[in-house]
Amino acid sequence: MPDTKYVDMYLQSFGNANSSYGDGRLNFNASKENKKDTYIYNPEDPAVQLIDVSENEVAVPGNYKDEEKRKDILCYTSEELEADLTITGDIIAEFYASSTAPDTDWVVKILDVDEEGNSIKLADGLLTAKYRNSFAKPEFMKADEVYNFIIRTSKISNTFKKGHKIRFTITSSAKNFIFPHSNTKKSFNSTKIVIAENTIYHGEKYPSKIILPIEG
């Protein structure tokens, strides 16, 4: 849209963005302080995607308030908005991450949090780490090496009302939507699973962010 401007919101925390009770924040201002957030992804205990596949998600948007209590979901939440804010289009998540595994999934969501704490999913996106540069030439990760990832979410048009908050979450599974990744080079075909430590980096050195298509 011609009147759309693309605005960065930066991921920030003091190193404990695990769950909605953590200290993860979304901020329009970048931080020079370098921090990281780590979670444990166990393929035998995946986070849940609140959908009815038979309806192709044509239903009431899922409320992730309870699911976001999990420690393997990193939550970054803005302050209460001082005025209505409308976004239209797809949102880009650009972040820096590492894993102790050679491969894993990244699942991101954008949510609208109201005054009562309900966290309504607006859009999501996912990427298997080995496809970060090309689907034709997969590249596995080296343990604990930091890589850049870019995920474009599904398109959305939404007005965040005054007093609401914008939330961005990242995890590595979405049961009911995708098969849990085994964290091995064989993905979901593997008979072996690996428990991974996945880490998101943010700050001046690693400016992880989301890019919002804001109207006006």
Image: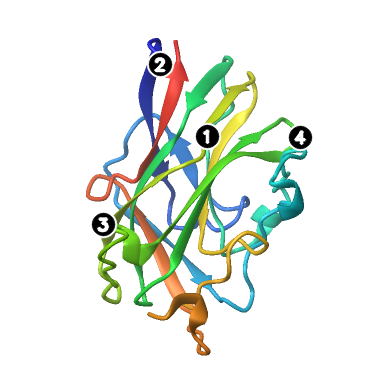
- Give x and y (percent) for residue 131: 33, 61
Q: Earlier in the sequence, mark 4 or mark 3?
A: 4
Callout in the foreground (1, 2): 2
Separation of marks 1 and 2 at Cα, in angstroms: 21 Å
Query: What residue is shown with label 1?
Result: 78
Callout in the foreground (2, 4): 2
Q: Earlier in the sequence, mark 1 or mark 2?
A: 2
Identify the amino acid type marked 4: Glu
Q: Quadrant of the C terminus?
A: top left
Identify the amino acid type marked 2: Thr
Separation of marks 2 and 3 at Cα, in angstroms: 28 Å
Identify the amino acid type marked 3: Asn
Q: Residue furthest bottom?
A: 191
Identify the amino acid type marked 1: Ser
Q: Earlier in the sequence, mark 2 or mark 3?
A: 2
Name the one closer to the observer, 31 or 182: 182
Marks 1 and 3 in Cβ contact (< 8 Å): no
In the figure, residue 176 lies in which quadrant? bottom right
Q: Residue furthest left?
A: 205
Tell me if 119 is positioned left or right of 31 in this view. right
Marks 1 and 4 in Cβ contact (< 8 Å): no
Q: Secondary structure at mark 1?
A: loop
Separation of marks 4 and 3 at Cα, in angstroms: 40 Å
Query: What residue is shown with label 3?
Result: 133
Count residues near mark 4 (Cα–Cα under 10 Å), then give few for <14, some for 14-19, many for 20+.
Answer: few
Callout in the foreground (2, 3): 3
Q: Secondary structure at mark 2?
A: strand
Q: Residue at x 59, y 31 (%)?
A: 165
